[in-house]
Image (cartoon, helix red, strand yellow):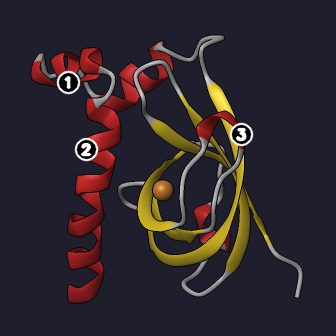
Amino acid sequence: MKTTRYAFARVAACAAISIGIGGASASAAAQGAPRDTVAQATETAEKTTGQGEGVVRAVDADDRRLMITHGPIAGPLEMSPMTMAFRVAPNVDLSSLSKGMKITFTISRDAKGLYVIEDVRPEKP
Ligand SMILES: [Cu+2]
């Protein structure tokens, strides 16, 4: 449990950086707007999606976050391989996921720079 918490804290910096790119989201957070509300409100045509592959490192069902070690993500979302935590969309069933599972996933980034996992598919053995 301790290592999981530490890992989430460590990757929070990565998330903070990506959130920080869209300056507007920082001011929204400063005004006390819940992030989920912001994410839903900005679900527009500016949302960009991409596909990734990775391994589940931790499942945080309470905060609806997934820690994933992912490979390179191609396309407009272009990301190099790393371990990071993602927010997970409400429709994704986290109960079917566990540590060590290989997955493919769909992520989106909204106009504010927030990444959300929209879909997760466990890799077939
Ligand atoms: Cu990443």
Q: CA distance from mark 3 to mark 1?
A: 26 Å
Is residue 86 found left or right of 103 in the rendered image? left
The residue at the point 59 percent across, 64 percent down is 94
Q: Amino acid at mark 3?
A: Gly
The residue at the point 23 percent across, 76 percent down is 5
Q: Which residue is mark 3?
A: 75
> Is there any visible trace of residue 66 in the rendered image?
yes
- For residue 121, which quarter of the picture? bottom right
Q: What x and y, as percent, mark residue 57?
A: 48, 79
Q: For residue 16, which numbered disc appears in the image?
A: 2
Disc 1 residue crowd, few under 14, some 14–19, many 20+, Cα 10 Å: some
Image quarter in which the N terminus is found: bottom left
Residue farthest right in this picture: 124
- For residue 113, which quarter of the picture? top left
Q: What x and y, as percent, mark residue 111?
A: 48, 18
Q: Nearer the viewer, residue 109 or 122?
A: 109
Q: For residue 26, which numbered disc appears in the image?
A: 1
Please determine whether, in this image, residue 10 is positioned above or below residue 77. below
Confirm or deny contact between disc 1 and disc 2 (CB under 8 A). no
Q: Amino acid at mark 2?
A: Ala
> Helix or strand or loop: what does disc 1 sit on?
helix
Q: CA distance from mark 3 to mark 2?
A: 22 Å
Q: Earlier in the sequence, mark 3 or mark 2?
A: 2
Nearer mark to the viewer, of 3 and 2: 3
Q: What x and y, as percent, mark residue 81?
A: 54, 66
